[in-house]
Image (spheres, rainbow, N blue to C red):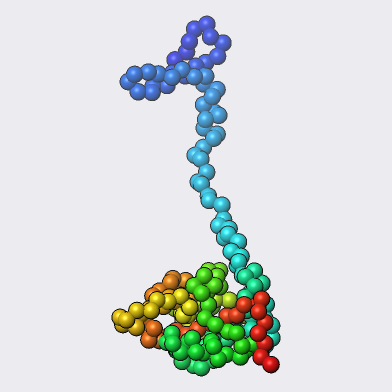
């Protein structure tokens, strides 16, 4: 309801605001309130995807079946045993395979340690380059490595026991998870041979 106040130079509007109090305000403020209207609906800013993560690895293709990782100063066989042979290897066969390897003209190939193998697990990569090319199981492996790879690799880290021919550590390159496997286990696995750059050991 509107009430005129005697002696005032401006008109005021008395607004009923509940049972406890009233609000007295100038009537010329009503036009301002009416002109504001309802607030505009909120619109979120467009989604901007974060920049892709950068790999911690730096591989150089030597053009002779080997890759050099410059930050660790290690040389890796471009093709693993599965890409080379077309079949899996148990731990015993993996050790012999690396020992007999002559890729790039070098003879000091070996099984990698768990730390060395874990270093080339690259979470920024998801490449369908395993032997069966299953798109459901891409590998955390740089695309410079040869196609037809194993899903997991043996390491030199092992424990000799008299029970169940146990065991050696391996890394599953679909997840980067470390596993303990019996020496005679083979399915989908192999060896990714590595060698130290500080000792050339070239074949003569």
* Left or right: where 183 falls relative to 68: left
Name the residue furthest left: 163
Q: What is the x, y in percent for residue 199? A: 65, 79
Q: Taking 105 as reference, is 123 above or below it? A: above
Front residue (pair 144, 96) = 96
Instruction: Count all numbered tags in the image, as a single digit.
Output: 0
Quadrant of the image containing the C terminus: bottom right
Location of residue 145 in the rendering, given as x and y in whole percent from the top left corner: 59, 82
Q: Farthest top residue? A: 7
Look at the image and tell me whether residue 50 can be seen: yes
* Quarter of the figure with residue 198: bottom right
Q: Is residue 147 left or right of residue 190?
A: right
Q: Residue at x 38, y 79 (%)?
A: 160
Residue 13 lies left or right of residue 32; in this view the side is left
**Which residue is at 47% across, 13% downward?**
4
The image shows residue 18 at horizontal and vertical percentages of 35, 23
Q: Quadrant of the N terminus?
A: top left
Q: Quadrant of residue 100?
A: bottom right
Please, is residue 29 above or below residue 68 in the view?
above
- Between residues 158 and 43, which one lies in front from this camera angle? 158
Task: From the top left corner, tell me how far across and down residue 46 is, in percent.
Answer: 57, 56
Residue drawn at (32%, 81%), measured in percent from left and top? 162
* 129 vs 44, nearest the viewer: 129
* Residue closest to the eye, 203 or 91: 203
Looking at the image, which residue is at 46% across and 80% down?
Answer: 154
Residue 147 shows in the view: no
């Amino acid at each position: 309801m509107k009430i005129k106040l005697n002696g005032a130079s401006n008109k005021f509007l008395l607004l009923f605001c509940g049972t406890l109090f009233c609000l007295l305000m100038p009537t010329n403020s009503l036009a301002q309130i009416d002109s504001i209207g309802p607030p505009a609906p909120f619109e979120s800013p467009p989604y901007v995807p974060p920049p892709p993560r950068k790999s911690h690895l730096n591989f150089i293709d030597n053009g002779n079946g080997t890759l050099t990782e410059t930050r660790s100063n290690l040389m890796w066989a471009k093709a693993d045993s599965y890409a080379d042979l077309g079949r899996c290897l148990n731990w015993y066969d993996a050790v012999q395979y690396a020992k007999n390897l002559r890729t790039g003209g070098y003879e000091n190939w070996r099984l990698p340690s768990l730390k060395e193998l874990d270093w080339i697990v690259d979470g920024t990569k998801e490449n369908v380059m395993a032997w069966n090319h299953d798109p459901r199981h891409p590998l955390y492996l740089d695309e410079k490595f040869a196609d037809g790879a194993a899903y997991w690799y043996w390491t030199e880290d092992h424990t000799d026991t008299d029970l169940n021919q146990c065991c050696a550590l391996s890394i599953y390159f679909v997840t980067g998870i470390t596993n303990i496997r019996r020496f005679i286990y083979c399915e989908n696995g192999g060896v990714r041979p590595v060698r130290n750059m500080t000792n050339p050991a070239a074949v003569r």
